[in-house]
Amino acid sequence: MAEEAILAYLEKEEEISNSENFAQQFGFSHEEILNVIRRLHGFKFVEAKDIRRERWVLTEEGETYAAVGSPEFQLFSAVPPEGIIALEELQKKLDPAVYKIGWQQALKNKWVQMKTDVPMKDVQPADDKVKDLLLRIQNNEVYCFEDIDALKRRKLIIQQVWKGNSVRKGPKYAPIRKRAATNLTRENLQRGDWKELEFKEYNFSAKGQPFEGGHLHPLLKACQTAILLQVRRQVQTIFLNMGFEEMPTNNYVESSFWNFDALFQPQQHPARDSHDTFFLKVPSTTKMLPEDYVERVKEIHESGGYQSRGYGYDWKREEANKNLLRTHTTAVSSRMLFALAQKPFAPKKYYSIDRVFRNEAVDRTHLAEFHQIEGLICDRGLTLGDLIGVLHDFFSRLGMSKLRFKPAYNPYTEPSMEIFSYHEGFKKWVEVGNSGMFRPEMLLPMGLPEDVRVIAWGLSLERPTMILYGIDNIRDLFGSKVDLSLIKRNPICRLGL
Amino acid sequence: MPTVSVGRDRLFEALGRTYTDEEFDELCFKFGIELDDITTEKAIQRKEKHLDEEGTEDDGETIYKIEVPANRYDLLCLEGLAQALRIFNGLDPIPTYKVANIGKESMLEMHVKTETSKIRPYVVCAVLRGVTFDEAKYNSFIDLQDRLHQNICRRRTLVAIGTHDLDTIEGPFTYEALPPAEINFVPLKQTRNFRADELMEFYKSDLKLKKFLHIIENSPVYPVIYDCKRTVLSLPPIINGAHSAISLKTKNVFIECTATDLTKANIVLNTMVTMFSVYCERKFEVEPVKVTYSDGKSFVYPDLSIYNMNVPLSYITGIIGVQLPEEKVASLLHKMQLRAEKSLSEDKKVKFVVFVPPTRSDVLHPCDVAEDVAIAYGYNEIPKRKPASLKPLPLSQFSDLIRTEIAMAGYTEVLTWILCTKKEISSMLNREEDSSAAIIADSRTSEFEVVRSTLMPGLLRTVGHNKDHSKPIKIFEVGDVVFLDATNDVGAVNRRHLAALYCGATSGFELIHGLLDKIMEATGANFVSPGNSSGYYIEKSEEPALLQGRQASVIYAGKRIGTFGIVHPKVLKEFDIPDPCSFLELDMQTFL
């Protein structure tokens, strides 16, 4: 409003000489006009010059006198025309403060005098010069210094600095200013006027707004993703406490070779179907494999060796080259063990917790992506007893101390054991993971010494989390559809504490 | 894992005793199979028809659904299960399978024509003589074929089984490959004659068979088996002829398995004949068939020879971790259908010659023998030992530190899918198609087309799904994205990214900027003037997913490591978000 008025005025006129006058003329408060001028000046729409004037303004007392007359005049007026009144009478007619000041001033002005004990008018008639002066000052009229001095001493007026602007067109003047925005608001989106927004140049040399922090509350009132994350951290701590070293699992794209072939998983195995595995269109094939090792893997699949009968089929390199999204982190284990075999043997304990992929339709119990926990120990002379021992150690730290083991089949472990834990709540045994010893057909072609055995186990992060926290829909655990306000008062993850 | 449905009462009859469900479950657990479900024939039918009726008292026979290991084809039928469990329980000796000793002249013959090499080059055959079927046995025989087809035969692509009433046909047989128009026969379950190409068309509407048509459909020649009178036995791997169909009255069964994989064909044939030779007049005896190829080479099937495997005692006990005497090991192996004979090796150490029967194709290596000893001994009887230790990777450790820092700033951590649609990393982000993303070949779900190359869609989707959540929404994610990278062996690499998003009544742009400062501070990077590579600074950027003028690149150690800014309103609209958002994404690996 005010802005438009100023810009419109300047379109026709050269200058606004006094902002205050302008404000009065167009019915704005001077303060508002000054704010607008300052802003327009900032955007260089106008050029404002400060005007500074010292002036006298009435004090509160002065303002009263300007309205009702000076106390001396009031006192003078209270004396009846006959000129004589009893002092007590006069005192009664007036406010005590007015009487007191009025009497002094009236005496000084020689408007009254004490004759014996009766006040009487001295001069007649008298003019209320003080009131007139105050009114003139209020109206910014000219006055002489002596008058000012007297009023100043009586504290009826006070000096004030007045600031205003004179305004002319600035270098970026335009009759209408598009407002430069500093932020995007919900209103902008609703009105759709974000298209017209022009932003004020951001200050790229400044730092951002400092913020207050220091609360861990998102973890305390955790949604289920937070539980999953806590369990992940806890599992990691368990592995570290058990002296395991983390494997680098930051490679989602893997070749069929490391994901399957190196694990002695035959090429016609159902898991290698596109029904179960995400194969990649881009990048579709792997370019580099360790050729002499590939030869040994081909050999063991086709015709055996290292005392194995092999699978007796034609092993195809094209199948091994096919890229996929790793179906298990064991693909990483096979790379790690191969790397280990290239050096003089040293025992190792490895672990990883990371995302794996299966070409599944997502429902309450299936996810196309989930987290796999894997642990393995590689050493000479390991036995099933060691595997059972380490599983008891690991799972009891997760709060599952009652375990039993079922024979199972897995293409790359032999013996293989499914791990069951007794669930006190459900009063039954539930499957919690898989384990076994890696097959010699996997380890020996890598070049590991014959007496080296690898015991390993794997489980999903989601399953124990669901069991431990009674969550029955796997989709609640993570993904974009997780309800952020699904805030349940779940206890802090105290697994193994 | 394949599941086998067997009638409980028939199974218990074969096992020679009854069990409670719990007892049987326990037996399965020890042996390494799983009692998956207990149901009835009628309940299964109701389920197939999606009926919700309650079961009644007379729901018929109780059915056990038993899950068996994927490499134990001998456990895919009641006969095999019963035999394995009986021997496991010490009731039966290990059967010795024999190939009938018949003269060359009376042996049935199968002649293979050259053309078959173009489509399905191998065939193996055998005959079961004097079989007595009843309805249950007959159904089991058919079911086993189905399960083999589903599992080891890979839905008939690798091997297809045909079984025939030998008394309706006459050898020698020929295995040929002919143009479809030249093949003419009455197929099983039909009453009229079909030409092979018509038949393929006809089966396109057959729910069961249509999924096998692709195996030969586009071949100029189809595999076909004839008898000496040109009666069609089968059109593998699709259908048998009606003429030679087996029935409850069949006494002599001719089995042929055509294949693209000879090893698996042998396993399939051996499984069929060993399992059902139990019903033969001469128990466990199978009559051989001579298969002659066009190059004159001939082979006699089935090959029921025993594979002799040398396994040192110390190897077995070394794996199990229990010192077992040799007699004990031998008796444990016996429970698992493996006969073992003790012998001394050259260095005077005890070893076994383990006789692996044709039913145990899963035994490939001495480690399989060791496992069987461990199973028979009992996994849960093995005393535990504690194996005779390090640090997390810098990348995870660093990620954790940063995650804590951001959580302390009041942001909630989310975990979103790594897979997303092409649109979500391109047009929905107001960007051109991303040529640096890894693309999935055939996904079951249209939601998953590519591997994410940015964390942005995951966070935006989360806000879109949580529109009604009170504002502001402050979320973050630390996770990997994938880019194509020709210098890596597989052609792609992961990068660890960090992303944070603020959504409120106003965009919170300065807050996100402030979060960046906080993160950079935590990594020990100083805010420096542009061009200085000793710390970080920000400069104007042109990222289409973000609003022009309210976005900046983050430059750290002279490298662009990410951007932040107000999310472009077009992008907000794509993700159905009514409120303004600011977003930050950084490559965290740069800090290491």
Image (cartoon, coloured by chain):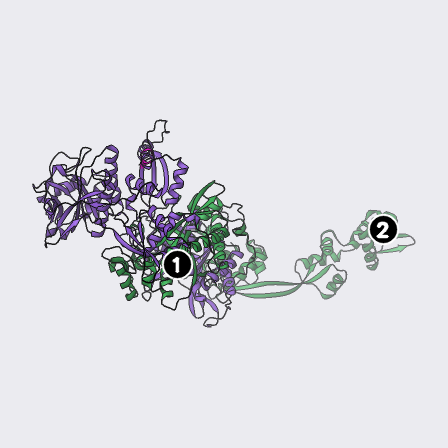
For numbered disc 2, what is the local secondary structure?
loop
Image x and y of residue B31, in percent:
37, 45
Amino acid tagged 2: Gly
Question: The C terminus of chain B is located in which quarter?
Answer: bottom left
Image x and y of residue A48, in percent:
54, 65
Residue that numbered label 2 is attached to: A83
Chain letter, colour green in render: A
What segment is highlighted magenta in the picture?
B6-11
Q: Residues within 10 Å of mark 2 (few under 14, many from 20)?
A: some
Is residue B195 at all visible to an observer of this figure? Answer: yes
Which chain hosts label 1?
A
Horizontal relation, residue A81 to residue B444: left or right: right
Residue at 14% in and 53% down? B117
For numbered disc 1, what is the local secondary structure?
strand
Which residue is nearer to you in this view: B267 or B280?
B280
Whether residue A267 is situated above or below residue B208 in the rendered picture: below
Residue that numbered label 1 is attached to: A454
Whether residue B252 is situated above or below residue A386 in the rendered picture: above
Dominant secondary structure (helix, strand or loop) of the stretch shown in magenta: helix
Q: Are marks 2 and 1 in contact (CB under 8 Å)?
A: no
Q: Earlier in the sequence, mark 2 or mark 1?
A: 2
Indicate the colour of chain B. Answer: purple
Amino acid tagged 1: Val
